[in-house]
Image (spheres, rainbow, N blue to C red):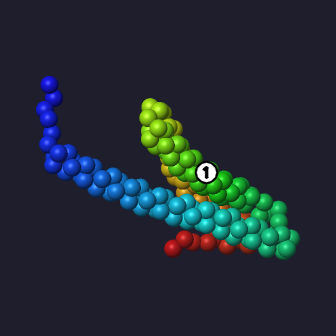
């Protein structure tokens, strides 16, 4: 026979549960805000990197050196892929919120399907995290590739040996 719990103890446990629930909700809100800030940042840096490289290519095309700048298109593609990865991460973030709300709505109805929906929500969350990381990797790769290509263009066109640092 299970031990009986006094009404005071039940009330204390319920208050503790509500406090912990509020802490979890606040933590989730802060994590969501940080995630959105990271996604905005990666979209901005990838987009502005691609725009900068396109401006450089455009300027070289005006000076009849467009063929020399053609290899930079690969860097632009990498940066655009980073923007696309960030956009997909935002989509998975919204899907996570949707599936989580569906799961908790079903829990209230005592449907018993909470676990399935929370698993789907967590898969969406991990997809968003991985895609955000890939977007940052795309920025690093695009910038390194662009810097290497620009260095090669300068060495071939002008004979300049640029130094870093």
Can you give x and y, in whole percent of width and height, for residue 110 in the image? 44, 35
Q: Please report the residue visible at 55 percent of the width from the left and 60 percent of the height from the top.
A: 39
Q: Is residue 74 above or below residue 5?
A: below
Can you give x and y, in whole percent of width and height, for residue 24 in the image? 35, 54
- Foreground: 54 or 47? 47
Q: Which residue is mark 1?
A: 91
Q: Is residue 2 above or below residue 27?
A: above
40 lies left or right of 1:
right
Residue pushed farthest front? 7
Q: Please report the residue visible at 43 percent of the width from the left and 59 percent of the height from the top.
A: 29
Q: Quadrant of residue 71?
A: bottom right
Q: Please report the residue visible at 25 percent of the width from the left and 53 percent of the height from the top.
A: 15
Secondary structure under tag 1 reads helix
Can you give x and y, in whole percent of width and height, for residue 2 in the image? 16, 29
Density class for disc 1 (Cα within 10 Å; few <14, some 14-19, many ≥20) is some
- Quadrant housing the N terminus: top left
């Amino acid at each position: 026979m299970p031990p009986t719990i006094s009404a005071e103890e039940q009330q204390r446990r319920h208050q503790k549960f509500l406090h912990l629930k509020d802490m979890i909700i606040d933590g989730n809100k802060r994590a969501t805000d940080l995630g959105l800030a990271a996604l905005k940042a990666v979209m901005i840096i990838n987009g502005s990197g691609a725009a900068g490289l396109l401006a450089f290519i455009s300027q070289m095309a005006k000076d009849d050196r467009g063929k020399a700048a053609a290899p930079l298109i690969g860097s632009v593609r990498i940066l655009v892929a980073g923007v696309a990865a960030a956009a997909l991460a935002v989509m998975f973030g919204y899907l996570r919120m949707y599936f989580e709300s569906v799961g908790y709505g079903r829990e209230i109805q005592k449907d018993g399907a909470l676990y399935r929906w929370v698993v789907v929500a967590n898969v969406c969350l991990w997809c968003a995290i991985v895609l955000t990381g890939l977007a940052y990797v795309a920025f690093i790769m695009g910038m390194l590739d662009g810097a290497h290509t620009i260095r090669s263009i300068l060495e071939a066109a002008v004979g300049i040996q640029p130094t870093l640092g």
